[in-house]
């Protein structure tokens, strides 16, 4: 198992040199999303997606109580950077769970 960049809200692992594991790592908060979590997820998916040797991506949550939860933003536009606009519903494909930024 190989470990890649260090993030605050997620873990990114390369397993068997072909599978990227993206783990939301906020178990005490039931892996609640916040703007930083979204930004890190986007970076991790991009990292795995651009690696031609990667054959699969696994998204999971740490802990045993919840996969993830989403916290409601307190102010409009609180998500900054690429996270607020990178995944628009028109580019989301539920059957393959992919999201491409515009």
Image (cartoon, grey):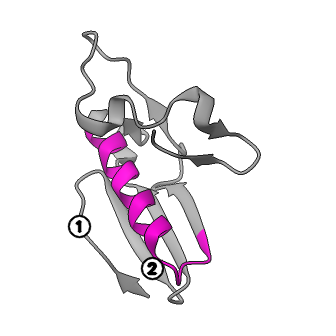
Viewer-side residue, 96 vs 16: 96
Considering only vertical position in the picture, is 47 above or below 10? below
Instruction: Please state the total of marks drawn on the protein image.
Output: 2
Considering only vertical position in the picture, is 20 above or below 45? below
Q: Which portion, as a residue range, is magenta?
A: 36-56
Look at 49% across and 65% down and name the residue there.
49
Q: Which residue is mark 1?
A: 6
Give the x, y percent position of residue 77: 27, 16
Look at 39% across and 49% down and name the residue there.
42
Q: Quadrant of residue 57?
A: bottom right
Q: Secondary structure at mark 1?
A: loop
- State how far apart marks 2 and 1 are (Cα): 13 Å
Queried whether the magenta region covers residue 51, the answer comes back as yes
- Principal secondary structure, stretch drawn in magenta: helix
Q: Quadrant of residue 45?
A: bottom left
Viewer-side residue, 25 vs 17: 17
Q: Which residue is mark 2?
A: 14
Residue placed furthest toward the front: 102
Q: Quadrant of residue 36?
A: top left
* Badge 2: residue crowd in 10 Å (few <14, some 14–19, many ≥20): some
Considering only vertical position in the picture, is 28 above or below 35? below
Viewer-side residue, 85 vs 20: 85
Q: Decide: marks 2, 1 in contact (CB < 8 A)?
A: no
Q: Quadrant of the N terminus?
A: bottom left
């Amino acid at each position: 198992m190989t470990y890649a960049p260090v993030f605050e809200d997620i873990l990114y692992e390369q397993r068997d040199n072909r599978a990227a594991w993206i783990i939301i790592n906020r178990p005490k908060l039931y892996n609640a999303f916040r703007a930083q979590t979204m930004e890190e997820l986007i970076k991790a998916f991009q990292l795995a997606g651009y690696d031609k040797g990667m054959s699969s991506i696994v998204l999971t949550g740490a802990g045993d109580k919840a996969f993830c939860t989403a916290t409601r933003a307190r102010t409009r536009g609180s998500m900054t950077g690429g996270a607020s606009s990178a995944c628009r519903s028109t580019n989301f494909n539920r059957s393959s769970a992919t999201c491409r930024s515009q």
